[in-house]
Amino acid sequence: MTYAEMSRMLRSTKTRERFNRLYSQKEFGYAYQMRRYSGLLTLHEDVFGREDALCFVSAPGRSELIGNHTDHNGGRVLAAAINVDTIACAARRQDNVVRFISEGYEPFEIALTELTPQPEEMGTSAALIRGVAAKMRELGYQVGGFDATATSDVLRGSGMSSSAAFEVLICAIFDQLYNGFSIDATTRASIAQYAENDFFMKPSGLMDQMASSTGGLVAINFQSAEPEVLPISFSFADAGYELVIVNTGGSHDDLTNEYAAIPEEMKAVAACFDAEALRFVRREQFIKELPQVRQIAGDRAALRAFHFFGENERVNSAVQALQEKDMPVFLEAIRASGLSSWTLLQNVYSGDEHQQMAVSLAFADTFLGIRGASRIHGGGFAGTTLHFVPEDIVDGFVEAMNDLFGAGACHTVDVRPEGAVIVAR
């Protein structure tokens, strides 16, 4: 497709319908998306002028509704793709060079002739591209060069999983340009996780990538090597609620050590029972041997194990509540999950300098009472909080939170029905 043809497609009725499905017609609707996509297309033509297999690719951010820090130990989560995303306009090259321009960042270029971790790239987008390419090639998929312009409204370091959205996006670009978009969502998520763990050098479970890759509202059981994904049919809007994510102004970009300690400590408890993850340990067994666990793994690790076992049960309760359309029971599970993250998992703040989320949760609980529910959002320690707000008070809630954390702190989001997609080609 040429630049002119792509421009006409973006303005078509078909694309308007596509945008409405992916983004809804609220904060992130058609006019906003047209500015984003048209801007990327113009930039791509101005900088690259390459139309070979030209396409638009999108990968969403995600919201972890419940199941905080359980995926890396084989637990259960309830997550949703949301209508903020990372998008790219990409065209195939005839060599193994990737040239990438992302709004707000310095352009870069990498050669795919070397697909091993490069120490100087650790923690960069280049490392993620190289890692995705390496895993895809290892699995027998084709990879090659491309030119891409990109932009993202997935807030970095905010708990919406900007890194997972980027990894999933890159996998989808390679897949579309060189494999006919044939990779299934679970494999795509595993490829993305590998890039983050082994090239970006940040530990993570698979939940972020699975939610972004799969789309929709999903319950995921990580008990086996092949995660079980259960789609949930439920509309929070129909139930009279809005999902509001509040950016408290902090970022967990510089808190990798705190983040990494959680799976390490949970696995240290599992090791007390000669197990590699807590999914192999029975709660009754853990309680019985608690004195020895405290002595070997420490008190904080024991508390985090308490959180793991309780959170798995809460996920089951929350999923059942949604299936039965029982919103009060669901909100009760969310509130209990938030309290457990705060008191047992201990990832609401780090030290004295990152306590914005604690303030957000305390204020929200006072404002909403039992009509709503609030909890930490994402990995924790800094970033965002998640709130389930009745529609009749959402305007007042947003206004109050923006007063507290600054204009634009609140984002009212919808569940996005699709994960990584080719928007136009």
Image (tube, helix red, strand yellow):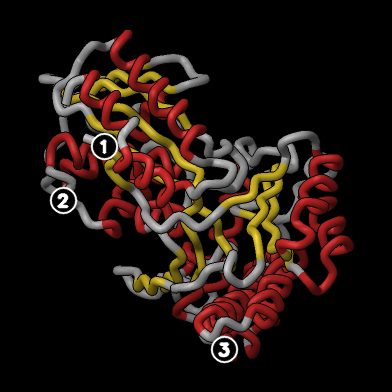
Residue at image x 23%, y 19%? 4
Residue picked out by circle 2:
182
**Residue 293 shows in this picture:** no
Residue 164, placed above or below residue 388: above
Mark 3 Cα-neighbour bin, 10 Å: few <14, some 14–19, many ≥20: few
Residue picked out by circle 3:
285
Q: How far apart in space, not on screen, are marks 1 and 2 (Cα)?
A: 16 Å
Q: Is residue 223 left or right of residue 238?
A: left
Q: How far apart in space, not on screen, are marks 2 and 3 (Cα)?
A: 44 Å
Mark 2 Cα-neighbour bin, 10 Å: few <14, some 14–19, many ≥20: few
For the C terminus, the image quarter is: top left
**Type of amino acid under label 3:** Gln
Residue picked out by circle 1:
424
**Type of amino acid under label 1:** Ala
Name the front one of labels 2 and 3: 2
Point out the tag, 2 or 3, that comes first from the N-terminus: 2
Residue 227, placed above or below residue 180: below
In the rendered image, which quarter is residue 369 located in? bottom right
Q: Residue 91 or 198: which is nearer the viewer? A: 91
For the N terminus, the image quarter is: top left
Residue at image x 86%, y 56%? 363
Residue 16 x %, y %: 38, 41
